[in-house]
Image (tube, rainbow, N blue to C red):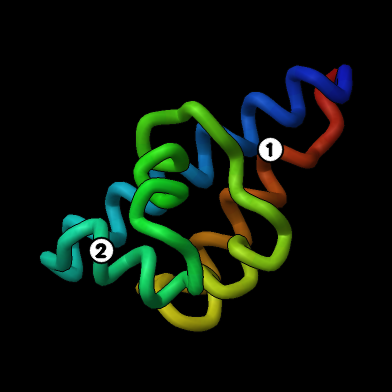
Amino acid sequence: MKKKKLYNDLKAYLRGELLRCRAALNIPQEEMAHRLLMSTRAYSALESGKSCCSLITAFLFFSRCCLDQAAFLDGILRILEPSE
């Protein structure tokens, strides 16, 4: 798998998880940004797909916001599995 495709797949997956989680928690972007220790503007860029979260932000999401940690990790592992 090429690194660029892997990057784009992980970026899309993380974006989707952020959107699903925020909707499930029924919180505004400002609250989600606060939980992830970032500005609302930076968080908005994640949701819109303009940027990708850092490893630190991904870990903060996992520990502070993620509703199903096992499913979240399974999703990442599926993306990382080598394709044949």
Q: Secondary structure at mark 1?
A: helix
**Residue 68 horizontal/vertical position (percent):** 42, 71
Res. 74 image quadrant: bottom right
Which of the two discs, 2 and 1, sits closer to the camera?
A: 2
Q: Amino acid at mark 2?
A: Glu
For residue 26, above or below residue 65: above
Res. 39 image quadrant: bottom left
For residue 39, above or below residue 12: below
For residue 36, above or below residue 22: below
Q: Specify the farthest residue to the left.
A: 26
- The residue tagged 1 is 79
Question: Residue at coordinates 56% horizontally, 34% vertically from top-left?
Answer: 51
Q: Earlier in the sequence, mark 2 or mark 1?
A: 2
Question: Residue at coordinates 80% horizontally, 39% vertically from top-left?
Answer: 81
Q: Secondary structure at mark 2?
A: helix
Question: Residue at coordinates 30% horizontally, 48% vertically from top-left?
Answer: 19
**Residue 9 horizontal/vertical position (percent):** 63, 28
- The residue tagged 2 is 30
Residue 15's disc number: none
Answer left or right for 58 relative to 56.
left
Res. 79 image quadrant: top right
Q: Amino acid at mark 1?
A: Ile
In space, the residues marked 2 and 1 are separated at their CA atoms by 29 Å
For residue 7, above or below residue 19: above
Q: In the rendered image, which quarter contains the C terminus?
A: top right
Question: Residue at coordinates 26% horizontally, 71% vertically from top-left?
Answer: 31
Q: Residues within 10 Å of mark 2 (few under 14, many from 20)?
A: some
Total marks shown come to 2
Nearest the eye: 47 or 69: 47
